[in-house]
Amino acid sequence: MTEHSGVQENLFQQVKNRLAPNLSFVHELSELLGISYDSAYRRIRGQKDLSLEELKLICTHYSISMDEVLNFKSDVVSFNTIAIGKDGFTFESWLHTLLGEMKKIFDCRNREIIYAAKDVPIFYYFEFPEIAAFKFFFWHKVLIPQSNYKNDHVDLEVPAELFETGRKLLSCYMKIPVTEIWSEDTISSIIRQIDYCMVSGFFKTKEDAFRLCDVINLWLEHVQSQAEYSFQYMLGRTPEGIENTYKLFHNEVLVNDNTILVHMDDQKVSYLTYNIINQLITKNPVFCDQIENSLRNLMQKSTMISGTSAKERYRFFNSLHEKVKTLRQKIERMD
């Protein structure tokens, strides 16, 4: 064993964690590096050091941070990014990539998601096709000008393939133990977006805007029901799940961004949202520990409204319904 075998062992473990169970690690390594099986085995056993180029190739191919491999502690943190518009990366590609990330979490034996939600978590958009379709329009029309989106008006019918991908994303999310931290501003973003589109003439009729208001109210009722049962389930199905796998907290003032911390067996991953929907992803252990400590502290300064906290839960969701009611009244007054 060489003095670098610990680093290689750490790297190879990261690779194994990313490989599908039906793939041979030795075969994948030999193919990637262009070496024989015997040479691959010698590297795996720590009998031969990886070259710097081989290390770079493996890390790049499997999206592994050098910080992860070297356990390097510094003020510099490496991130992967999921960004729409970069190098022709489309919304469809972005959604498929998110699904891939969610499947990795779902496949872990021990898993947990902690989500500080400044905006409505994207997974919920696919509970209702109308919300998914509206968001699809808004993002392409307002946030992704280079998309050359053709529609001039809001279309509440989302492309079937896109919606199906989103439903798979939602299905995985609902089967993972989740803690969400909301504030009264969590639905403010979509309300402002509907208002903006109404003022800008993007709705063909007021009825489409009213329809969205109705759907948001129905969605809020469903989330409230999930909080009462303390587990997630698909709308329209019999509520079935494992108690205490869905925890919802209400924070009055401190949810300033969309931050997700994920436990995947013995690993932590942080997802930070920027430019509304794009993602920065890191497995840097020091950074992830800081994010987790921040989120745990945020929970301590919040009120749990899932489970038995009926009074606080009703009060919170009534305040959200009032926001939707105010939007509806504003739309009614528009010419």
Image: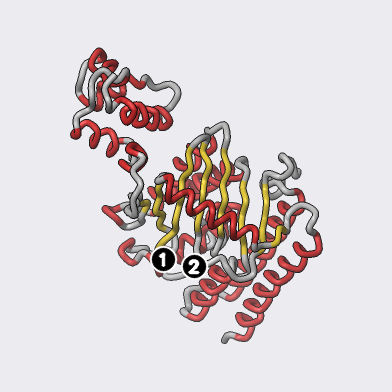
Name the residue located 68 percent from the left edge and 44 percent from the top edge. Answer: 245
In this view, 128 is above or below 321: above
What amino acid is labelled 2 in the image?
A: Val
Q: Quick one: SS at disc 1?
A: loop
The quadrant of the image that shows the C terminus is: bottom right
Q: How many marks?
A: 2
SS state under label 2: loop
Image coordinates of residue 259 in percent, x first then y, are 50, 57
Q: Is residue 229 visible?
A: yes
Give the left or right position of residue 163, taking residue 83 as reference.
right
Residue drawn at x 76%, y 68% as measured from the top left: 315
Q: Amino acid at mark 1?
A: Asn
Q: Which residue is mark 1?
A: 151
Residue nearest the observer in this picture, 258 or 135:
258
| Mark 2 vs mark 1, CA separation in Å | 7 Å
Q: Position of residue 141 (x, y in %)?
A: 40, 67
Which residue has dot 2 on it? 154
Report the residue at 52% width, 67% height from top: 256
Indicate how the structure is coloured in the image.
Answer: secondary structure
Query: Looking at the figure, which quarter contains the N terminus?
Result: top left
In x, y percent, where is residue 264? 51, 38
Q: Which mark is residue 262?
A: none
Q: Is residue 219 left or right of residue 264?
A: right
Please tell me whether residue 22 is drawn above or below residue 146 in the rendered image: above
Picture quadrant of residue 320: bottom right
Tell me whether circle 2 and circle 1 mark residues in contact (CB < 8 Å).
Answer: yes
Q: Position of 4 compared to 283: left or right?
A: left
Q: Position of residue 283 (x, y in %)?
A: 41, 44
Q: Residue at 23% across / 16% down in the picture?
A: 39
Instruction: Answer whether residue 211 is visible to the viewer in this image.
Output: no
Residue density around tag 1, few if under 14, some if 14–19, many if 20 or more, within 10 Å:
few
Say which of 223 and 45 sits in front: 45
